[in-house]
Image (cartoon, rainbow, N blue to C red):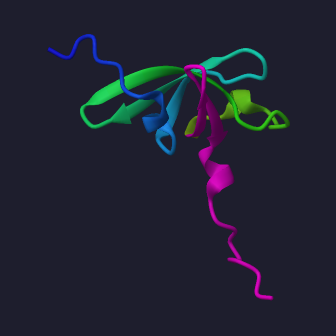
Amino acid sequence: TDSGWQPDEMSFVGCEARVILPVRHGKGGQIMVRRGEREHELRALPFDARAVEPERWRSVVVIEMDGGAARVSPMESLAPAEDGPADR
């Protein structure tokens, strides 16, 4: 069986997740990451220490893993600008 199986934490980097307990500065929240047929609950902290109101985030992406905790950013911050890249 795979009941003792633990995925390599780096495999969560780049995954989208939903917030199940608010993410806060200095106090971890909880996110649910779905990979294949499994869901994984991870402790989560903001990736950006200057992030504004991370407790309002609902959907996030895992930017990096840090000692078992996911460092996350909100999905909306990763959306491309409406006007596209600037021409130079």
For the C terminus, the image quarter is: bottom right
Left or right of residue 38, residue 71 in this image: right
Q: Furthest-right residue in view? A: 50
Residue plotted at (77% across, 38% down): 48
Residue plotted at (76% across, 87% down): 87
Q: Is residue 63 magenta?
A: yes
For the N terminus, the image quarter is: top left
Q: Position of residue 61 (x, y in %)?
A: 56, 42
Picture quadrant where residue 2 is located: top left
Residue plotted at (73% across, 31% down): 54
Q: Which of 87 and 74 is in front in this view?
A: 87
Which residues are the magenta region?
A: 62-88
Q: Where is residue 8 in the image (x, y as percent from the top left)?
A: 41, 28
Q: Furthest-top residue in view? A: 4
Q: Furthest-left residue in view? A: 1
**In this rendering, is residue 62 above or below 6?**
below
Residue plotted at (27% across, 37% down): 36
Q: Which of 60 and 68 is in front in this view?
A: 68
Left or right of residue 45, residue 50 in this image: right
Q: Does the magenta stretch include residue 23?
A: no
**In this rendering, is residue 51 above or below 86?**
above
Picture quadrant where residue 37 is located: top left
**In this rendering, is residue 80 above or below 9?**
below
Picture quadrant where residue 21 is located: top right
